[in-house]
Image (cartoon, helix red, strand yellow):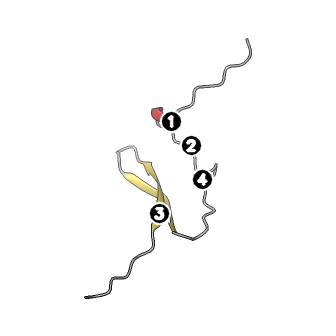
């Protein structure tokens, strides 16, 4: 029986921008393997999603 080597689990995070004609333009790619520390840009370095599903209504001030 042949021995099988297991690949470590990994996560790839890709950020795209859609062009006016609908094509994807890759802006960045980060790959993190299981057990590796990750200090990635999830917290402000990447722009917030602009799709209607993720829009936050403006805060209302006191009345």
**Residues tagged 2 and 1 counted as in contact (Cβ below 8 A):** yes
**Residue 9 pos. (x, y %):** 45, 69
Left or right: where 52 falls relative to 45: left
Q: CA distance from mark 2 to mark 1?
A: 9 Å
> Regarding mark 2 in the picture, which secondary structure is present there?
loop
Q: How many marks?
A: 4
**Circle 1 sits in a helix, a strand or a loop, which is it?**
helix
Identify which residue is drawn at 46% across, 37% down: 51
Say few, some or many: other residues with alpha carbon within 10 Å of mark 4 (under 14 / 14 to 19 / 20 or more): few
State the residue position of label 2.
48
Which residue sits furthest front? 1
- The residue identified by callout 3 is 11
Find the distance from the CA under tag 3 to the CA under tag 1.
Answer: 23 Å
Please say if 33 is above or below 5.
above
Left or right: where does residue 27 sit relative to residue 59? left
Distance from disc 4 to disc 3, alpha carbons, whole Å, reads 14 Å
Sequence-first tag of 2 and 3: 3
Image-based side of 46 in relation to 23, left or right: right
Q: Are marks 2 and 3 in contact (CB under 8 Å)?
A: no
Closer to the chain start, of discs 3 and 1, is 3
Mark 4–mark 2 distance (CA, rounded to whole Å): 10 Å
Q: Residue at x 63, y 50 (%)?
A: 43
Looking at marks 4 and 2 on the same chain, the residue that comes earlier in the sequence is marked by 4
2 vs 3, front mark: 3
The residue indicated by pointer 4 is: 42
Residue under label 1, please give it.
54
């Amino acid at each position: 029986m042949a021995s099988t080597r297991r690949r470590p689990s990994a996560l790839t995070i890709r950020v795209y921008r859609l062009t006016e004609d609908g094509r994807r333009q890759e802006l960045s790619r980060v790959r993190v393997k299981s057990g590796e520390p990750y200090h990635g840009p999830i917290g402000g370095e990447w722009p917030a999603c602009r799709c209607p599903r993720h829009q936050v209504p403006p805060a209302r001030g006191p009345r």
